[in-house]
Image: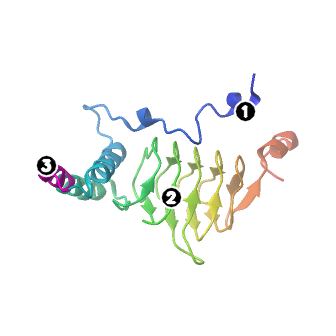
Amino acid sequence: MNDRLLHHPISASVADWSREVKPRWAWMPGKSLLASIRSYQRHRGSNNPLRIAACKVAVLRHRFWSAVSGADIPLNCQLGGGLLLPHPNGVVIHPDSRIGPNCLIFQQVTIGYGYGGVPQIGGHVDIGAGAKLLGAIQVGDHALIGANAVVLCDVPAEKSAVGIPARILDPGRAARAGGLSE
């Protein structure tokens, strides 16, 4: 059996769209905000009058859910499928950044411009509350970004970044040492 499958049951390359489905009865601003973004992206650029109307409705829904959730996620963001925003309050994402499939972003996260570019985030990346990812950095698949980390450098795949400024931890080495220290 492949050992990697045991550690990473969620794919970093194939979107799990079921993670974005919202029950009709539930109050989930994060999923409603994502649904409005997906609707806009699906209908934009069409000449069909119904799709133009649907696009305008999606813009209104996006404005409403942005105000309710307090998130600043532009309609033209490149978001991979399966994105989870359990607490979207204060999430700010630069319109030029790319986020891979099956990512998890907690509250007060900023993914923004700095040092000549914007972050590119791989698949199945978990970003803790209050983290800041700034500049032209690459975050690899299955990476973990700790709460309140300020990431200004690349994070390799399957590594963790913690601290201000963030430093990279090797999870295997930290586990052998009995803690999170290097």
Q: CA distance from mark 1 to mark 3?
A: 46 Å
Residue 88, numbered circle: none
Residue 4, numbered circle: 1
50 part of magenta stretch = yes
Of the numbered discs 1 and 3, the one sitting upstream in the chain is 1
Identify the amino acid type marked 2. Answer: Arg
Helix, strand, or loop for circle 2?
strand
Residue at 65 percent of width and 49 percent of height: 143
Q: Report x, y in % for residue 66.
A: 30, 57
Which residue was labeled with disc 2? 98
Which residue was labeled with disc 3? 50
Q: Give the color scheme: rainbow, by chain, secondary structure or one colour.
A: rainbow
Most frequent secondary structure within the magenta stretch: helix
Q: Is residue 150 above or below residue 13?
A: below
18 part of magenta stretch = no
Location of residue 26 by image quarter? top left
Residue that sits furthest to the bottom in the current view? 116
Of the numbered discs 2 and 3, the one sitting upstream in the chain is 3
Helix, strand, or loop for circle 1?
helix
Q: Are marks 1 and 3 in contact (CB under 8 Å)?
A: no
